[in-house]
């Protein structure tokens, strides 16, 4: 089960670090919200099921596997979001702000 579109900006290491315009900012934030919400919702949902629903051991194992998968996706998204893809671009943008 693939919860995140692997072609999206956030799940790709080739994503540029910062948007250039207000329109890009809004679009970037909207995409970021969508991409992070998917695995986070899965983590919350499956952890709720494990904590509050009386289910079989097989169902619990399935939930645990999906929790793990969603957590790894979320970690990957956050890592790609916080790590600059191109240090030269980051340096140039920092110099522009000075």
Image (tube, grey):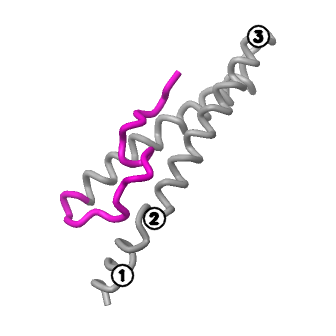
Q: Secondary structure at mark 3?
A: helix
Task: Tell me the number on the disc at residue 77.
Answer: none
Q: Residue at x 44, y 44 (%)?
A: 11
Q: Is residue 89 left or right of residue 71?
A: left
Q: Residue at x 28, y 63 (%)?
A: 19
Mark 2 to mark 1 CA distance (whole Å): 12 Å
Q: Residue at x 34, y 46 (%)?
A: 31
Mark 3 Cα within 10 Å, few/some/many (few <14, many 20+)?
A: few
Q: Secondary structure at mark 1?
A: helix
* Residue placed most toward the observer, 91 or 72: 91
Mark 1 to mark 3 CA distance (whole Å): 52 Å
State which quadrant residue 86 falls in. Answer: bottom left
Q: Is residue 49 left or right of residue 87?
A: right
Q: Earlier in the sequence, mark 1 or mark 3?
A: 3
Looking at the image, the residue that sits furthest to the right is 57
Residue matched to label 2: 84
Which segment did they paint magenta?
1-24
| Residue 42, horizontal then vertical, whole percent | 56, 30
Q: Residue at x 33, y 86 (%)?
A: 95
| Residue 51, horizontal then vertical, whole percent | 75, 27
Dots 3, 2 in contact, CB < 8 A: no
State which quadrant residue 6 falls in. Answer: top left
Q: Earlier in the sequence, mark 2 or mark 1?
A: 2
Magenta stretch: helix, strand or loop mostly: loop
Residue matched to label 3: 58
Task: Tell me the number on the disc at residue 94.
Answer: 1
């Amino acid at each position: 089960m693939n919860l995140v579109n692997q072609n999206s900006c956030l799940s790709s290491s080739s994503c540029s670090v910062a948007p250039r315009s207000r329109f890009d900012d809004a679009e970037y934030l909207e995409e970021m919200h969508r991409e992070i919400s998917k695995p986070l919702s899965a983590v919350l949902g499956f952890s709720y099921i494990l904590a509050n629903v009386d289910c079989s051991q097989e169902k619990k194992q399935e939930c645990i596997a999906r929790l793990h998968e969603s957590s790894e996706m979320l970690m990957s998204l956050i890592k790609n979001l916080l790590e600059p893809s191109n240090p030269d671009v980051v340096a140039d943008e920092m110099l522009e702000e000075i």
